[in-house]
Image (cartoon, rainbow, N blue to C red):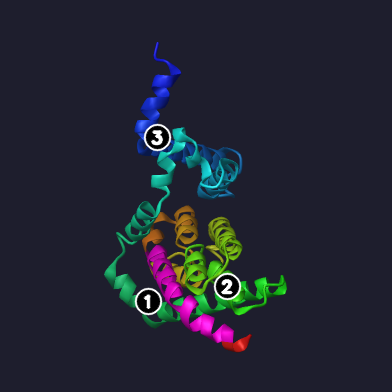
Amino acid sequence: MIGLDVLDEVFIKNGLILAFLIVGVILFLADWMSKKIFNKRIPGVAIAILAALVMAYFGGDEGISNHPFFSGMALLGGVMFRDFTIVATAMGANLFELRKTGLPGIISLLLGITVTFFVGGSIGYAMGYTDAVSFTTIGAGACTYIVGPITGAAIGASSDLIVISIAAGVVKTIFVTIITPLVAKKIGLDNPSTAMIFGGMIGTTSGVAAGLAATDPKLVPYGALTATLYTGIGVLLCPSFFYLFMVYLL
């Protein structure tokens, strides 16, 4: 029989393959729970995200990748695969549909970023984070959990503030994932144009993509495309224009 030490060595040497296997199993079980237990009221991706957060919490400073057996998760969850995934979501989008959205799509991007930034920052302000750096970092995190830490690092925010900004973005992602399929029919989220406007207003790429996947997989490329642009614009505006505005205001 093959010893446990041999299996452990094989898994460690093939950490990335094992990471894909683990994620696949989690998604399979999450989808099964969504169908059999929650009757599809909660999307499988939302359950999977929650499971991943629990695993990360008990894993330590670097999540479960702290354990050699799960070392491949650090690569799978790194910035390279993250950025590749975000870019890949735009594949399959129809250029004609993108052009047809036009001005409403642009307005949704700017309005979505501005409203989310000030709502998130105001919540932080009400909790006692009243200086410009804190307001900006938390507001940027409310935009997305990517914009938050980038903004915080650019304007000299503390690590605690950056963690709060990430947490705000994660909560938003989970909320959008769960709520999107529940409200899709009521808000007319059933065509590429509304999907793009929705992505521009909400912004969190992972949440929009997961929510649209549970609503209609054909809409994912459109919503994810404007959500990705949202992230890019947020990275430009939050540590520059919005930060300077908050310095002046506060």
Q: Is residue 37 left or right of residue 128?
A: left
* Residue at image point 46% right, 73% down: 234
Is residue 52 in sight in this rendering?
yes
**In the image, residue 6 above or below residue 161:** above
Between residue 93 and residue 185, name the one nearer to us: 93
165 or 26: nearer the viewer: 165
* Badge nearest the viewer, 2 or 1: 2
Q: Residue 162 location, x and y as percent?
A: 56, 64
Q: Amino acid at mark 2?
A: Gly
Number of residues whose C-alpha sits closer than 10 Å to that of mark 2, classed few (under 14), some (14–19) or many (20 or more)? many
Residue found 39% across the figure and 26% down from its top: 9
**Residue 223 is one of the magenta-drawn residues:** yes
Q: CA distance from mark 1 to mark 3?
A: 41 Å
Q: Which residue is mark 2?
A: 139
Residue type of the residue flagged with mark 3:
Leu
Name the dominant secondary structure of the magenta segment. helix
Q: Which residue is mark 1?
A: 101
Residue hosting label 3: 18
State if disc 2 and disc 3 touch (CB < 8 Å). no
The amino acid beneath tag 1 is Thr
Q: Which residues are magenta?
A: 222-247
